[in-house]
Image (spheres, rainbow, N blue to C red):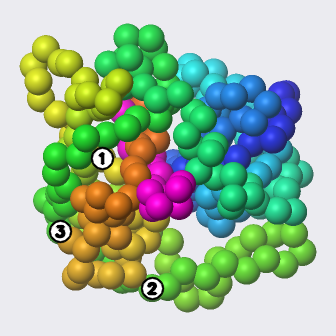
Amino acid sequence: MVLLKNLVVLGQGAPNQLKDGRQSTCVCSWSLDDKCFIRIYPVPLGWLRKWDMFDVEVEKNPRDHRENTWKIKNSKEDWKRLDKWIKKADKDYPKKDRINLIESIPKTTISELRENGKSFGLIKPLIVDFKLVQKKDNTEKQMTLMGFSKSDGETTLDEGYEIINQKDYKYKPYLVYYCEIGGKKESKKNNKPYEQQITEWGCYEFMRKNSGKESNLKDNLRLFDEEWEKYLLVGNIHKSIKTYIIIDVLRYKKKETE
């Protein structure tokens, strides 16, 4: 068992369903103590939100060798009582310090991550395009508003809410971009931009709440708004460690830094 302390949630993927039926998310956090990214899974829906601070007891998954990747201790046996192992702080990470935290994290490129075998990175993108890729089966579930409640220490979904997993959405959002390094576009042999899926839960929530208006997601993310600073929190996937997805689009208005 390992106790990880002083973690801050920076990004969280949209829900996925495990083989045994449990529905969970994967959380990417920043360790204030060790100054590194930490991946935590499986996390029940509603337990952690962006900028939450928490401690957690974890164990290694012998089938997952990704860097700084941990499974919550006894997550299967204690699924409905994971507050035994996850201790969320009373207050989230201070709002006044969030931009400074983002700026303090070293920036990288996809090439560097692949070459060095790294699992995570924060990238300054030069955005080329945003795409919504429609699934072939045209899947679209009923969209209902989310609600969480907590009683007796257990977080549950409010009555009437149907959990929607990533695979159940009609569209998948993708971002096409180059990595910026030293204020310039990253030099690449084929000079082609990266095209990566965005798995940020907030993006899927936007599509769920705005069925038929999914194309407005690019504006919600401020992707092409020059007044907003954008960084991409990326992480690799279990079955293909050199393939990266966008866990979160961290963004803030530039004038907030003045």
- Label 1: how many Cα within 10 Å (few below 14, some 14–19, many 20+): some
* Mark 2 neighbour class, 10 Å CA radius: few under 14, some 14 to 19, many 20 or more: some
x and y, in percent, of residue 23 in the image:
56, 59
Between label 3 and label 2, give the one nearer the viewer.
Answer: 2
Region of the chain picked out in magenta, as a range: 242-258
Residue 5: quarter of image? top right
Q: What residue sits right under mark 2 in the picture?
A: 144
Circles 3 and 1: CB atoms closer than 8 Å:
no
Residue at 35% x, 51% y is: 198
Quadrant of the image containing the N terminus: top right
Residue 240 circle label: none
Marked residue nearer the N-terminal end (3 or 2): 3
Q: Is residue 129 left or right of residue 38?
A: left
**Mark 1 highlights which residue?**
197
Identified by mark 3, the residue type is: Asn
Q: x and y percent of residue 108 in the render?
A: 42, 25
